Image (tube, rainbow, N blue to C red):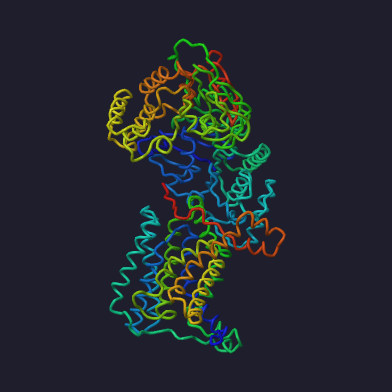
Amino acid sequence: MNELPLTALLASVLATAAPLIIATLGETITEKAGVINLSLDGSLLLSAMIAFMVGFETGSFTLGFAAGAVTGAAIALLVGFFGIYLGQLQVAVGFALTLMCKDLAYFLGNPYSRLQGPQLISWKIPGLSEIPFFGPILFQQPLPVYMGLLLIPAVWWYFYRTSRGLELRAVGENPEACYTRGIDPRRKQILYIVIGGALVGLAGAAFSLGIKPGWGRPQGIEGLGWIALAIVIFGGWHPIRVALGAFLFAFLQVMGIVLQGIWTGIPAQVFQMAPFPLMILALVLINLLQYKGVQRWLEDKPGLALLVDKLRGAPPRALGKTFHPD
Amino acid sequence: MQVELQQIHKRFGKNHALKGVDLKVEAGTIHGLVGENGAGKSTLMKILTGYLSRTQGRILLDGREMAEADPATAAKSGIGMLYQEPQDFPPLTVLENFMVGRDAEPDSDRDRQRQRLNDLAGGLHFQLDPALKLEKLTVGERQQLELLRLLGRGVQVLILDEPTTGISDRQKERLFGALHQIRDQGRTILLVSHKLEDVVALCDRVTVLRHGMVTGEAQAPFQVPRLLEMMFDKPPETDTRSEAAARGEPLLSFDQVSADGERTGLSECNLTIHRREVVGLAGLSGSGQGLFLRLAAALDKPARGKIRTLGNDLGNMGHREFRQAGGCFLPADRLEEGLIPGFTVQDHFALAHNCGMATAKVLAAEAISQFRIRGHPHTTAESLSGGNQQRLLLSLMPPDASLALLENPTRGLDMESARLVWEHLRRQFASRGAIVFSSAELDEILNIADRVLVFFDGRIVRDLPIGELDYQDVAAAMTGK
């Protein structure tokens, strides 16, 4: 592993994690408000494709990212409208849209396949990027990485320190009670599914314009949407724990690529596939921490117990449900 | 604030729940609204708070008409309601629960809000820790918090829907003290309850509802028998009972049985039911009758005590064994527990009798004519009307059962169908076994049963043979008097 120094390894974990963080936090916002947007995998693909297409045609990153965000938001709006206002099963609508968006992305994106398009370059933050070790990891990255990193405290702050964030959580817990207190739960839910969807769209753009540049079939990000959904669940709908999950997955993916170069005897597919089951295993282990036996074992370890307690999370009680006033 | 409701009507589909209710409540009084379950009390109050829309009618606040509103607008006019189902957020903290809401000027400053909460709590002698998660609180404490929140929003009209359900006596005392204090500040309180003891202790004036209509009003001091007369229908003087037959051997016995469930649970239940008895379970819904039947049918397990059914110890018996021993249970939730939506009438017979479709069709056709079910063998269960679903359920009961446990067996049937059903049930079961049934209609119990058990708050408060039974006494026992 000598040819790959630690800084480069960590920098690439961060870069790989960033779009995933943006997408998982988007879904966290959506689900915290009590709606499930299951279209994540298709949303990511379609917004990645459209962002690349717009970026390629206009040469503008701003327009490319905007197109990605609008695509994600539009798909989320569909899920929200059918699920919240027309009373359809949110999971079913989301699933159908996943499949549709995926096929649509490959169909519409065909002319742009394997083209050399615009790619974001790293943006060195003056001064900070000179810091030894941390500089190259944290402050010589493409824009989406800064976006993802800043989003973590921002979402946490919004959820737990603002009154609108409190309303968001309240709607996810009990929309009926919100209605009796003068908050329109359906409007809130539509708002947050659209915001969450826009973030998912930004994540898609971050892939095709930066982290995994270009468009092709099969697209390297296929399947990531499903992992993102799993990370939100195992992350207990808590922004920080969810972000940690995204980091872990990115770490596994990068390690896969690194080890592929070292153990050349093992088929490459094993390394490409391994992060997925390993991720699920890791998430299951994290969840096991909440079992009674583990909790008892933690009793005489106050520091660790506090950490586990901070990380635990329960699903929003009204997840997938909404309230229709008389 | 003076509140006046004029000619309020509410329809839920075909159901005419409120039929022109007039109600006038003076400022600075505690006004009680009493009636049986389903009389329309909660519906009326939810219309006042804007939670439900009204089909027809006017609402006047201090003489000014209030337009159709949602809860937020009603709240801004000064109306707040403590709902029977707590409308709060258990995973959030006490302080967060206090803060959520757009029904007043929002203020996201946590320190200021904590101070307000503490001040309000101190004023009414409540003790609540703002940092605690709400799910760690008792029902009574959650209610106290909601009360403080409403007061903090400056409500002038406070509606409480069954506030004494599920709270301790001490909390009830606190609540009543607080309510007197709130009234003396000049605010108006509307108290919805079916517990007459609470109403008598607290209210200045009472309005009685029955079947969606006002049947009377009274001023404190109240005469309980008068209120009871207005609450319940007088029993008609008819009797379908045949000569009472001699009791047989015990079929069902409860020995010191306690159990959790429903709202009230069941405590210390002792009794024996014998062959050839028809036992009616009276009580306001949710007083423990349902749980009693489910325990007897081995669908629930008691926390303490021993139940013997049909000569077997229920300790190691499931519902399957209960049925094999000759028991049968008819649940109240027709489509959830009794029938299978999507299955046709003949499918149900095929399942119940474990027979082929041809036989099932014959059985179904027989049952349709015998029980006058309006439908065909190929009609699905959910497309039958409520009354016809009930007939189908009755026709599916095994004819040789020796212990029939029936939850509201004639619910949704008109008088004539109910009479037919009871003739059939008596002929089929009462001669060979025992029938235990609950009913929301006190009349039905008094007309049908040989023996009446009255449930209140999870206890059997009366156990009387029909001959010794006094209508007034049963009605009073049902409301805890």
Give x and y (percent) for residue B198. Answer: 61, 33
Res. B466 in view: yes
Please indicate whether residue A158 sits to the left or right of residue A295 in the image.
Answer: left
Give x and y (percent) for residue A79. Answer: 38, 60
Snapshot quadrant of residue B20 = top left
Given the current orientation, which residue lies at the most extreme top position? B243
Give x and y (percent) for residue A289. Answer: 61, 60
Quarter placement of the C terminus of chain B: top right
- Relative to residue B373, is residue A52 depicted above or below? below
- Relative to residue B94, is residue B33 depicted above or below? above
Q: Nearer the viewer, residue A294 or B438?
A: A294
Please indicate whether residue B74 sits to the left or right of residue B13 in the image.
Answer: right
Quarter placement of the N terminus of chain B: top right
Snapshot quadrant of residue B182 = top right
Give x and y (percent) for residue B308. Answer: 57, 26
Please indicate whether residue A80 sits to the left or right of residue B281 in the image.
Answer: left
Q: Nearer the viewer, residue A121 or B445?
A: A121
Q: Nearer the viewer, residue B438 or B5?
A: B438
